Amino acid sequence: MTYKEYRSTLSEDINRLTLNKHIKACKYYFTTASFKIIFWYRLGSYIKSKKGFLKLFYPLVYFIELHIQWRVGINLVLGTKIKGGLMFDHFSGIVINPGAIIGRNCTIYQCVTIGNTTGFKRGGERKMYDWR
């Protein structure tokens, strides 16, 4: 992820919350858990993809993001492919698989799991096992 991609996706997230992004971004960081977790997720994903001096800050950002995940109940792995405009309208009980790809302007509500289908056939049909 380049710095330009990082800034554009974070800008899209801010625009999703407010029309005047420069004045109200700090307000939303301190008042909404949705933007707080998205901010640290974007920063952590950016640092995770870099090498060199910037990589030294990764453990700190990782533990801050992990702490916020624990407080709000959202399991979001750094590096998951999520485009800009993400918003968690209500939080708690949200799990997103790191293999998921989430598009632009996605709103995720409480108690949502976006995962894989281990143990199931394509289309959600259950595998039947014969245990005889």
Image: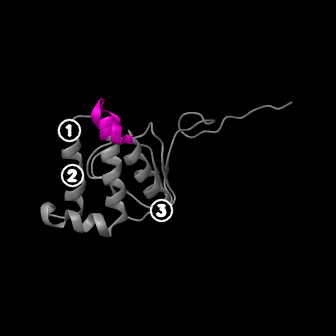
User: Disc 2 to disc 1, how far (Cα)?
Assistant: 14 Å
For marks 2 and 1, give the one nearer the viewer.
Answer: 1
SS of the residue under disc 1: helix
- Give the residue at x 31% y 70%: 31
96 vs 12, left or right, is: right
Read off the residue under disc 1: 3
Q: Classify the position of the C terminus by image quarter.
A: top right
Residue 103, quarter of picture: top left
In percent of width and height, residue 69 lies at 46, 55
Crowd class of label 1 (few under 14; some 14 to 19; many from 20; radius 10 Å): few
Q: Nearer the viewer, residue 93 or 59?
A: 59
Q: Is residue 88 visible?
A: no
What residue sits right under mark 2 in the picture?
A: 12
Which of the pair 41/130 is nearer the observer? 41
- Mark 2 and mark 1 residues within 8 Å of each other at the beta carbon: no
For this view, does 51 lie left or right of residue 114? left
Relative image position of residue 123 (x, y in whole percent): 53, 38
Magenta segment: 46-58
Q: Residues within 10 Å of mark 3 (few under 14, many from 20)?
A: few
| The disc label shown at residue 98, or none | none
Q: Amino acid at mark 1?
A: Tyr
